Image (cartoon, rainbow, N blue to C red):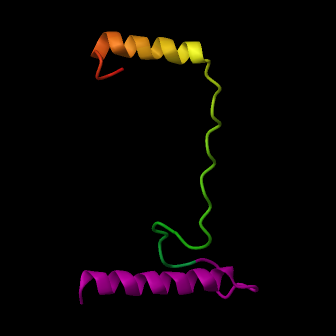
Amino acid sequence: YSANYVRDILKVFGMLMDDAVDHRPPLLPASPVPKVNRRRGRVVPKPREKKNVVLTSDLHQLAENARIVWGETGY
């Protein structure tokens, strides 16, 4: 069998075994399939970083430093 076919069959079998373990009452005490990269369920976005308030004078100083180091192309 091809590698993709085997991977897909193991993936479906693993989902069946996980559902059997999660069932109430549990049909199996533990899943016999090793856990590999479980990506089921709803996608939860990562929390975003808070933006810091930066003074205009600090930004101007940063731009001046870039102009001195890189010339007009970095400014």
Residue 50: image location, x then y, percent? 65, 37
- Is residue 20 or residue 42 the one in the foreground? 42
Q: Residue at x 32, y 85 (%)?
A: 6
How many numbered circles does the render carry? 0
Instruction: Name the side, left or right, on which 57 lies relative to 69.
Output: right
Q: Residue at x 62, y 61 (%)?
A: 44
Quarter of the rendering containing residue 24: bottom right
- Is residue 47 or residue 40 the one in the foreground? 47
Residue 56 magenta-highlighted: no
Magenta stretch, main secondary structure class: helix
Q: Residue at x 28, y 23 (%)?
A: 73
In the image, the segment drawn in magenta is 1-30
Residue 9 magenta-highlighted: yes
Residue 19: image location, x then y, percent? 62, 83
Instruction: Name the side, left or right, on which 37 lies relative to 8.
Output: right
Instruction: Name the side, left or right, on which 12 lies relative to 66.
Output: right
Q: Residue at x 30, y 18 (%)?
A: 72
Quarter of the rendering containing residue 4: bottom left
Where is the N terminus found, in terms of image quarters? bottom left
Residue 12: image location, x then y, percent? 47, 86
- Is residue 4 or residue 54 the one in the foreground? 54
Quarter of the rendering containing residue 64: top left
Residue 16: image location, x then y, percent? 55, 87
Residue at the far front in the pictured view: 72
- Is residue 46 or residue 30 the one in the foreground? 46
